Structures are given as structure tokens and as C-alpha cells.
Amino acid sequence: MDHDRIFKELLTTFFVEFVELFLPDMYAYLDPASLEFLDKEVFTDVTAGEKHEVDLVVKARFRGEEAFFLVHVENQASAQSEFPKRMFTYFARLHEKYALPVYPVVLFSYETPQRAEPRQYRVEFPGKTVLHFEYTVIQLNRLSWRKFASQPNPVASALMARMKIAPRDRPKARIECLRLLGTLKLDPARSKLIGGFIETYLQLSAAEMRLYEREFAKLTSNEKESTMEMITSWEKTGMERVVLRLLHRRFGQLPEALEKRIDGLSAEELENLTDTFLDMTTPAELETWLSRFNTQ
């Protein structure tokens, strides 16, 4: 699984919300309108002959000032003994290249080990400290998901799925992730992004799904409705993509007006289309089939 890509997509889409949730001091002086996501940085470790790619670097302006700084966020999906040294190397090279102050952040996203990870790198001699470098640590497996269930923040809704969850609480945690997401009223694309994150990192067994359904039954009518609308929307979007891909293979590129009419179909109508389109030989037959429905 490409953990770095999944986390980078989440943090890029919801960077301000990430800062607001985990870095409130920075949020107070960050100008949200100034964000610039820089191209990926690749640093070569000359001694080891390895290349390391920095996960996320954001250029931002201090609120009310013309001065800028960098935020470096590194998602770490596994424990590594040399990681503090690597964080300092990234800091030094970013600072050297851009000549800007760098705010380093590590998001530890693995399940184990749960020991507290170091948050500094030091170079010392007897009686003298040459270097004391510190970075901010967000270690998800040491954070209780319950403390974030009431936070009206999309990043909380997603990352709760990766926090410390007792085995017996997994169905309840999934319900709370989705319930919180439903209250945020995000657009379908961003809602689906978080829903996919939850689905990836909080998959349930058959036995857990039965408990999940019991927990779902405890939600209020409004919570049930908003959650089901959201899930149905994800499912419909996924079906649309599959249907359009199959139609493109059969007929080639379709007129934009025809694709918009397909987009207007309900989930049930899309399912019917998948059962019938193999009998069609031309786009005209597809258009005739679509004319049965009030789609524009």
C-alpha cells in the first residue's frame, strides 16, 4: 500500500485543517491564502547511495507580514532508528536551498510499536552540545480516537481511523468517523477522499460489521440519513466511473452531453445500464436507451 501517497493527498487537500487541528500555535500566524505546495524534493544520501523523497513541503506567509516560511511534513509509516538524523538532514537541505525558516513535522502513522518516538536529534561532546534539533511529533497510535470524535474537522474524521483503537471499539470508531464526516457537509469529491481513507485504514471483519450495524442503529434519524446519503453518493460516483470506462472501451470517447446524461442517472439506473449496454452496438442505441429517463 502506498501510504505516503494516501497521506499526502489527504494533507494537501486539507492542509489548513491539519494545521488547525494539530498545530494551533502555527495556525494563529499562518496566512491560509498564501499556501504554495512546492515540487517534491529528492535528496541523495551520498554515503549510502540512496535517494530520499521529502513527503510534503509547503511555503506559507506569516499573517499580516511579507515574510515567508516552510512547513515540512513527513509521514512515517514504519519505525526507523536513524529517522531523527534524516529529519535533520531534510531540514538542513531545505533551509539551505530556500533560505527560509523551516517548521519540521512528523506524522507517525504506523500501528506498532506504540513507544514514544524521539522528537530531537543531538550532536554532543563531553561538556558541549554542538547541535540540538527538534521537530514536532504527531504519533497517531498514541492518540485516543475518542478525544477527536467531537472535533468538527475533516482531518480528525480521517485520522481517527489510524489512532489508538481498542479491538472491541473498532466498529464504534468507524461509526464515529463516518458520523463526524456526515456533519461536515463537504462536497462529494472531498467527502469521498476521506471516506476512502476510512475504508482503507479501518476495514472490519464480518463479525465487526455485525457490531457496526448495531452501532449504526443507535444513531439519530438525522445522523443515519446524512451518513447513508454520503455513502450512497460515494457508491454512485464509483459506479459512474466504472460504467463510463466500460462505455469508452466499447464506443470510444462519448459526446460530453451524453456523459452528462449518464451522470444524471440514479444508482439503480446505472446498474440497469451495466446489464444492457453489452447488447448495444452504437452510441445512438445508448442515446435511445438514455432517452427513457429524464436526464439532461
Image (spheres, rainbow, N blue to C red):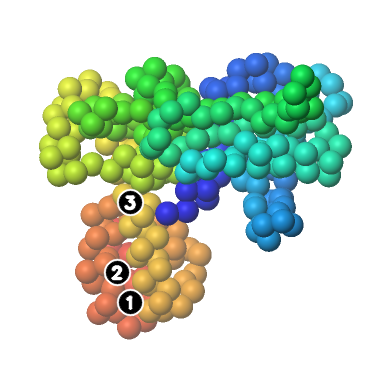
Q: Residue at x 36, y 46 (%)?
A: 200
What distance separates the C-alpha of mark 3 from that of mark 2? Answer: 19 Å
How many numbered discs?
Answer: 3
Tag 2: amino acid: Trp
Answer left or right for 219 relative to 27: left
Q: Position of residue 138 (x, y in %)?
A: 52, 28
Residue on which the image places disc 1: 285
Most foreground residue, 202 or 30: 202
Most foreground residue, 106 or 271: 106
Q: Residue at x 37, y 34 (%)?
A: 161
Q: Tell me which label, 3 or 1, sits earlier in the chain.
A: 3
The crowding category of the residue bearing disc 3, from other C-alpha atoms within 10 Å (few below 14, some 14 to 19, many at least 20), is some
C-beta proximity under 8 Å, tags 2 and 1: yes
Q: Is residue 206 visible?
A: yes
Q: Position of residue 126 (x, y in %)?
A: 75, 23
Tag 1: amino acid: Glu
In the rendered image, the quadrant that contains the C terminus is: bottom left
Answer left or right for 286 relative to 99: left
Q: Tell me which label, 3 or 2, sits earlier in the chain.
A: 3
Most foreground residue, 142 or 70: 142
The crowding category of the residue bearing disc 1, from other C-alpha atoms within 10 Å (few below 14, some 14 to 19, many at least 20), is few
Q: Secondary structure at mark 2?
A: helix
Q: Residue at x 68, y 61 (%)?
A: 49
Residue on which the image places disc 2: 289
Q: Position of residue 116 (x, y in %)?
A: 48, 26
Residue on which the image places disc 3: 236
